[in-house]
């Protein structure tokens, strides 16, 4: 038995044949062990597809875990900082989870598929932690990452396109809702979720349906200017929309080596996801203590003067370095220069004016720019259509 | 009778490093070597025409980059090439590839267990934490906890501070790591036998302990704390064999005016009025110097070449009690071609990596039981490599050289010396194991050099054939190496020093003991320091 | 129903001691236990009509004299026998007697005789230092408060005061194995083995396992705690339990036997009571568990009531054990070649050499039963005839090592192993087989079933240095409190660990009182 090197090569998603065919610039990246396009044709045009028409992102490499059994709800309530009992069937929520020290492990979305049946969808792999969490609970954890193909269909025309595909009544689906349809005789699940901050949906089918789904989706969407989008465009959209990413905006606690490098949800501006009224969840006591004592860091969204992205910048208060930037981009829709930064407390309150130390290079010439920036209260991009039900049609 | 400023006994890599730094500081240095060739256990030899064997140490990772760079070893011919990864063959025909590429390793692990593949990140982070703690101390003299000298107190405080920075739980986890077994450590992360067995091998190589013996987690760390070009934990080949390291060190030494004298078998260190004054060779020749540095292991240093009347009783006792157990053997094999291995594409890059055949920790533990019972392992743990897959200078084109490190082999069989029949039996147990996974391997053997601890001791002068010049257990590490109270490279006789792997930071081709000892000697001579400090770790 | 300040789970010696100290401080204390007899592992059972054996622990050798005094255990009925010496049986009938500093027989040479007192002396120096750690809570290192800093300073001072030579020796010895230390000091096989036995008793380790000097010191510390040396408890070990129960009750504690705690109840962040087997709930300010940590957290509280990291710590806590017990009812006093009746009443060990101990250990690593075993034997009926019908005797022996679960299960192996053990004894005591009235072999799962100790581990979790001191039972749950507010540990799974010592129980009581949680 000779193992084929293919077994350990980068994998391809169920959409790969279609993705490759639509990727003329052939710029690939490795996402979670899958060959995925960083860009299909032009990052900026792809980005604008999300914001003005419909962008399609292959999110099959996301890690999906099925959590089911009599204790599934209790299990998630202990693991997540949010109260999952409040999540109705066919509803989705964004959630984070911590270790005992209250340090962030990861974030993700929880799909409630039944009374005792959930799906957790996360950017990072979580097999080990999910299994440790299962001690003492009557619950089954299945890694179903490879059993489900997923597409994010995002943008102002997305509802229209999906309705044409056969998702009748989709416009009635509220944000974070789940609707079930049939596609070519097989189940197709659509959730009004996404990583773009725009009107958008995620479509989930069995891998066997993937290619047909792609073909028909692009057929239906042709007149609505549907476009595939790659990782770079999505990253731009998520920064504009205010979403965090593991390993970029925080280090998952169980993979952190150096003391003091982990962050709590409070330090990441995610206190709204922490339900202290729950009697027990991982990190509860530590987070309560942190709340009483005060956090070491504050997550800040910065609106930076000028148009030079503040990637990897130091943030100063006067002459003193008080923080560093984790994500930054010039955001084309809001026409703002945005950055996320971790700022040492007590700095970083909304309204604080700080300085970003930005370096940029033109024709091998480096410029150091000390750009004033203001801590803002939440993302600048937050369109009405994201929240509207019925979803606006074009 | 020739007079030098300093004499170093033993032209192994630490002796050469020590000599090089002393010479660099302007001392008139001679490095004496018993054998007609230099290198000690860091040597390449042509034992079959056209094949070069790294016939003792065989891979490099621990060699401190600060020294490589400072002594300009690349200019003197040293090139270390990483080989990346390894394989453990399983009895069921499958195998586990330990790819150097993180993503590829994930997918290979996931083939065996997705949970393990995911838990590997936690394992890697926790283990990195330990390497980060120890690495800053490699290029430093350990502080003496029993001393009240300001320097020791300051160093101890710094040491304590770096541990305190971890916080209570991680500090306790660190103590657990340092006092625990590699088996228990791995059980906290993994469920798959072959993954655990693959990693656990690093916890027992060169060590007379089993995977479930406390203390072996540190041995794992000892094999992980080196690096190749900043890739911590990576291993590589010295092009031309490990002798290339010794040769480049000798050129560095000579470039600073140092001298190497081969066939110089030291009989005794000459001591006058409590001061080292030189050495007398077995052939009666004497060399004089006010500085005598022993690169022999602590037992040989204090029990063989020093007159007991020159030593305090406690040092003699400590030297007698020093743990230096032989536990390893080696087969160096000239091959007529490339053997094939079940389940591996001969073109696979993994043919250039390490290969192991113990697919459970229980098999490794049983191999240790044989050693305890005074015999070689009937089902040994092998660390096997084909360096000629990476380095074309090791064998003629199309031919191959194979290096097989064998754990365990005792220094004595049932309390008596090894016989040639024992050696044949030992060799057979190794060849049998490889043949189980490589059908054509036996037919390709042109020459097989089998080395039990008996041969290793006789040829290289490692007592009991212990490759680390002393067990790497906590009682013989850091400020306890070689003995508590004598960890700062000074012997109890004025002008006499130790620089072998028997001193901090211990065994492996690291060169740090030689360099650290030189720093102490120069400080005693009130000469400017020529020895670099360690790179700051990030 | 009365509200209690504290409910103590388990009326083992540590539970009762903790309860007694808390009650003496004026607290309302309830000690509950599912067994009918108090004492836990300090228990007496009728093996056959009229034959009484100490069912689990058989020796007392490190029971803190202070506790005997504080709790008035003698007045409460505790009588111990005279100090025993150790007789290491040799196959040639020329046995070795170890009595304090004195070695006799077995051709012991002057060199060993001279070295032995010096060795003991040094061990005592180390044990005294260790005692500083044992008599209080193990200090935290980073989050240390002034109490901890004081302990650490005392420890540092103690280290300095023992002298540079001793300190250097300790630095070398503390993580080393007993095998090397014995070989460094002595020549006599039997002597080395008999001493090494103390280092491995109750652990899952062999003499060649590093860290066994630490476990040796754990036992050697007994000389500091209990002036009387190895003794038997008159009336059997259960009498210790009875006296502790009386003492606890005299101090004002309520002791309820025959009523298991089914569950520890947590409300909000805090533990607030226990549910008993009769279905009743007892509310309390603090639950103090003398059950082992795994039972306490995994079974009584439940993993689902812990945060995941803590649950993982519990699941990873090691409870392997290799200790079994042989019980014999004998129609007469066995004849051991070369031993008179007085010698027979001492502690008898069969451990021919350290290698034989190591060889006896190897099989359990692979869940095998092995063929040769190590015996630590007591014939208590010589000193205490009440334990057996007139002229008849009982023999109990600790057996090292037998696995928790051999392949095929114990049912398939029990009789063979029992026969084999008796055969091994017969070699030293010819005619023994014919004297046997009743016999039984208790293996680790039996102890687990009878005494609730996970894995059948007598120390409530392996007592290896990585699970000792401030690491006991695991990081995050040390100093008797746990990561769960209101829940405390006072059993052998807490610092300073196993053996009939009483310190975990007493230290826990002091710590709980100091924290003021019962106020």
Image (cartoon, rainbow, N blue to C red):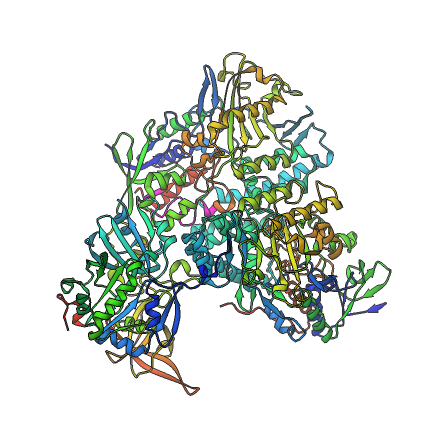
In the image, taking residue C169 as reference, residue A348 lies left or right, namely left
Q: Position of residue B178 (x, y in %)?
A: 53, 52
Q: For residue B302, what is the image quadrant?
A: bottom right
Q: Position of residue C35 (x, y in %)?
A: 37, 27
The vertical placement of C425 against A149, above or below, is above
In the image, taking residue B429 as reference, residue A259 lies left or right, namely left
Which one is in front, A67 or C241? A67
- Residue at 55% x, 47% y: name it: B211
Quick check: is C478 in the magenta stretch?
A: yes
Secondary structure that dominates the magenta span: loop
- Residue at 46% x, 52% y: name it: B172
Whether residue B180 can be seen here = no
Q: For residue A102, what is the image quadrant?
A: bottom left
**Residues in magenta, as a range:** C468-487
In the image, taking residue B43 as reference, residue B286 lies left or right, namely right
Which one is in front, C199 or A90? A90
In the image, taking residue A295 as reference, residue B32 lies left or right, namely right
Q: Position of residue B404 (x, y in %)?
A: 64, 55
- Residue at 70% x, 37% y: name it: C187
Quarter the N terminus of chain B occupies: bottom right
Q: Position of residue B435 (x, y in %)?
A: 62, 50
Q: For residue C196, what is the image quadrant?
A: top right
Whether residue C87 can be seen here = yes
Which one is in front, B353 or A21? A21
Quick check: is C89 in the magenta stretch?
A: no
């Amino acid at each position: 038995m000779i193992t084929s090197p293919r077994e350990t090569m980068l994998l391809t998603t169920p959409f790969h044949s279609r993705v490759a065919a639509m990727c003329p610039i052939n710029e690939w990246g490795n996402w979670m062990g899958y060959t995925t396009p960083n860009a299909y044709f032009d990052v900026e045009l792809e980005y604008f597809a999300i914001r003005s028409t419909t962008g399609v992102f292959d999110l099959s490499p996301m890690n999906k875990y099925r959590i089911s059994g009599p204790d599934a709800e209790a299990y998630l309530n202990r693991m997540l900082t949010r109260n999952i009992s409040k999540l109705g069937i066919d509803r989705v929520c964004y959630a984070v989870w911590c270790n005992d020290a209250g340090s962030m492990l990861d974030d993700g979305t929880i799909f409630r598929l039944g009374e005792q049946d959930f799906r957790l969808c996360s950017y990072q792999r979580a097999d080990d932690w999910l299994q440790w969490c299962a001690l003492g609970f009557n619950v089954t954890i299945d890694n179903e990452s490879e059993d489900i193909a997923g597409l994010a269909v995002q943008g102002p025309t997305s509802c229209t396109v999906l309705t044409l595909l056969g998702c009748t009544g989709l416009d009635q689906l509220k944000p974070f809702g789940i609707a079930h349809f049939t596609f070519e005789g097989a189940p197709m699940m659509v959730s009004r979720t996404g990583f773009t901050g725009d009107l958008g949906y995620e479509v989930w089918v069995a891998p066997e349906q993937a290619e047909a789904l792609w073909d028909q989706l692009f057929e239906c969407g042709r007149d609505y200017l549907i476009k595939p989008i790659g990782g770079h465009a999505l990253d731009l959209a998520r920064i504009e929309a205010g979403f965090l990413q593991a390993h970029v905006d925080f280090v998952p606690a169980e993979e952190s080596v150096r003391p003091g490098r982990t962050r709590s949800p409070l330090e990441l501006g995610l206190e709204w996801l922490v339900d202290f009224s729950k009697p027990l969840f991982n990190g509860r006591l530590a987070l309560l203590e942190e709340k009483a004592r005060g956090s070491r860091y504050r997550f800040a969204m910065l609106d930076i003067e000028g148009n030079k992205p503040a990637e990897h910048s130091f943030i100063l208060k006067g002459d003193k370095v008080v923080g560093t930037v984790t994500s930054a981009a010039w955001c084309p829709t809001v026409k703002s220069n945005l950055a996320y930064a971790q700022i040492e407390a007590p700095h970083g309150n909304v309204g604080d004016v700080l300085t970003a130390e930005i370096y940029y290079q033109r024709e091998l010439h480096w410029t150091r720019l000390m750009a004033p920036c203001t801590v803002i209260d939440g993302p600048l991009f937050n369109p009405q259509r994201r929240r509207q039900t019925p979803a606006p049609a074009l | 009778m020739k007079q030098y400023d300093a004499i170093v006994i033993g032209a192994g890599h630490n002796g050469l490093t020590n000599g090089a730094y002393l010479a660099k500081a302007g001392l008139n240095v001679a490095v004496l070597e018993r054998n007609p060739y230099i290198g000690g256990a860091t040597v390449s030899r042509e034992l079959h025409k056209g094949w070069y064997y790294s016939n003792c140490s065989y891979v490099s990772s621990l060699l401190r980059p600060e020294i490589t760079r400072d002594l300009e070893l690349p200019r003197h011919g040293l090139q270390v090439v990483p080989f990346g990864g390894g394989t453990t063959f399983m009895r069921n025909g499958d195998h586990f590839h330990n790819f150097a590429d993180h993503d590829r390793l994930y997918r290979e692990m996931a083939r065996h267990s997705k949970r393990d593949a995911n838990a590997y990140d936690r394992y890697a982070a926790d283990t990195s934490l330990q390497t980060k703690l120890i690495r800053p101390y490699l290029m430093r003299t350990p502080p003496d906890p029993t001393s009240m000298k300001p320097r020791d107190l300051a160093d101890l405080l710094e040491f304590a501070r770096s541990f305190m920075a971890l916080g209570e739980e991680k500090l306790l986890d660190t103590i657990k790591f340092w006092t625990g077994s590699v088996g228990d450590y791995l059980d906290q992360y993994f469920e798959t036998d072959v993954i655990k067995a693959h990693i656990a091998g690093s916890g027992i190589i060169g060590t007379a302990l089993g995977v479930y013996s406390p203390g072996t987690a540190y041995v794992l760390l000892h094999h992980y704390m080196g690096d190749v070009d900043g890739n911590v934990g990576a291993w590589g080949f010295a092009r031309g064999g490990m002798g290339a390291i010794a040769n480049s060190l000798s050129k560095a030494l000579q470039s600073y005016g140092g001298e190497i004298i081969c066939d110089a078998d030291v009989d005794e260190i000459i001591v006058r009025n409590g001061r080292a004054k030189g050495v007398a060779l077995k052939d009666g020749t004497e060399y004089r110097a006010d500085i005598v540095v022993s690169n022999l292991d602590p037992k040989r240093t204090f029990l063989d070449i020093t007159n007991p009347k020159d030593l305090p009783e406690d040092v003699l006792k400590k030297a007698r009690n020093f743990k230096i157990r032989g536990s390893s053997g080696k087969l160096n094999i000239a091959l007529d071609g490339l053997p094939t291995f079940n389940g591996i594409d001969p073109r696979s890059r993994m043919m250039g990596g390490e290969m192991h055949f113990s697919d459970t920790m229980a098999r490794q533990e049983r191999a240790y039981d044989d050693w305890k019972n005074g015999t070689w392992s009937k089902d040994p743990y092998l660390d096997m490599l084909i360096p000629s897959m990476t380095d074309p200078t090791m064998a003629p084109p199309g031919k191959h050289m194979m290096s097989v490190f064998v754990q365990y082999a005792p220094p004595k069989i049932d309390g008596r010396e090894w016989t040639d029949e024992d050696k044949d039996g030992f060799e057979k147990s190794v060849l049998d194991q490889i043949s189980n996974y490589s059908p054509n391997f036996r037919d390709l053997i042109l020459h097989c050099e089998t080395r039990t601890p008996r041969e290793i001791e006789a040829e290289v002068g490692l007592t009991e054939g212990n490759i680390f010049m002393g067990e790497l257990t906590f009682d013989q590490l850091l400020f306890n190496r070689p003995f508590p109270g004598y960890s700062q490279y000074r012997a109890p006789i004025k002008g006499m020093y130790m620089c072998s792997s028997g001193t901090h930071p211990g065994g492996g081709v690291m060169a740090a003991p030689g360099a650290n000892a030189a720093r102490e000697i120069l400080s005693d001579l009130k000469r400017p320091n020529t020895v670099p400090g360690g790179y700051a770790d990030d | 129903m009365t509200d209690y300040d504290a409910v103590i789970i388990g009326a083992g010696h540590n539970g009762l001691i903790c309860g007694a100290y808390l009650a003496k401080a004026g607290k309302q204390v309830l000690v509950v236990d599912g067994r009918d007899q108090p004492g836990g592992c300090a228990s007496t059972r009728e093996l056959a009509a009229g034959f009484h054996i100490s069912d689990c622990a058989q020796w007392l050798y490190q029971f803190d004299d202070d506790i005997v005094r504080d709790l008035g255990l003698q007045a409460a009925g505790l009588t111990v026998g005279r100090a025993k010496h150790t007789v290491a049986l040799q196959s040639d009938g020329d046995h070795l007697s170890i009595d304090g500093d004195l070695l006799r027989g077995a051709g012991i040479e002057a060199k060993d005789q001279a070295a032995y007192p010096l060795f003991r002396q040094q061990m005592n120096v180390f044990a005294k230092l260790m005692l500083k750690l044992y008599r209080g809570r193990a200090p935290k290192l980073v989050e240390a408060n002034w109490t901890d800093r004081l302990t650490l300073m005392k420890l540092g001072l103690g280290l300095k005061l023992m002298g540079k030579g001793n300190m250097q020796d300790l630095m070398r010895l503390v993580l080393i194995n007993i095998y090397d230390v014995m070989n460094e000091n002595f020549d006599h096989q039997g002597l080395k083995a008999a001493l090494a036995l103390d280092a491995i008793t109750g652990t899952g380790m062999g003499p060649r396992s590093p860290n066994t000097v630490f476990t040796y010191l754990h036992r050697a510390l007994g000389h500091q705690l209990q002036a009387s040396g190895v003794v038997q408890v008159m009336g059997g070990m259960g009498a210790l339990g009875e006296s502790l129960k009386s003492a606890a009750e005299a101090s004002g504690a309520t002791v309820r036997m025959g009523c298991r705690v089914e569950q520890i109840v947590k409300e909000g962040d805090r533990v607030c009571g226990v549910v008993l087997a009769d279905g009743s709930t007892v509310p309390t300010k603090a639950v103090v568990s003398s059950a082992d940590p795994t039972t306490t957290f995994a079974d009584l509280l439940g993993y689902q009531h812990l945060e995941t990291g803590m649950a993982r710590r519990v699941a990873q806590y090691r409870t392997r054990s290799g200790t079994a017990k042989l019980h014999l009812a004998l129609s007469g006093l066995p004849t051991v070649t070369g031993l008179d009746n007085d010698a027979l009443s001492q502690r008898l060990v069969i451990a021919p050499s350290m290698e034989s101990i190591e060889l006896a250990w190897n099989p359990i690593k692979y869940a095998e039963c092995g063929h040769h075993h190590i015996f630590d034997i007591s014939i208590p009926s010589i000193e205490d005839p009440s334990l057996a019908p007139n002229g008849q005797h009982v023999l109990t022996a600790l057996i090292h090592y037998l696995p928790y679960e051999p392949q095929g299960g114990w049912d398939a192996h029990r009789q063979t192993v029992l026969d084999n053990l008796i055969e091994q004894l017969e070699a030293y005591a010819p005619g023994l087989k014919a004297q046997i009235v009743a016999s039984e072999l208790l293996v680790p799962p039996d102890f687990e079933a009878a005494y609730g100790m996970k894995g059948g581990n007598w120390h409530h979790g392996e007592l290896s240095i990585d699970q000792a001191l401030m690491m006991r039972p695991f990081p995050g749950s040390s100093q008797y409190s746990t990561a769960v507010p209101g829940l405390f540990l006072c059993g052998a799974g807490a610092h300073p660990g196993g053996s009939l010592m009483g310190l975990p129980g007493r230290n826990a009581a002091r710590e709980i009182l100091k924290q003021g949680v019962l106020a």
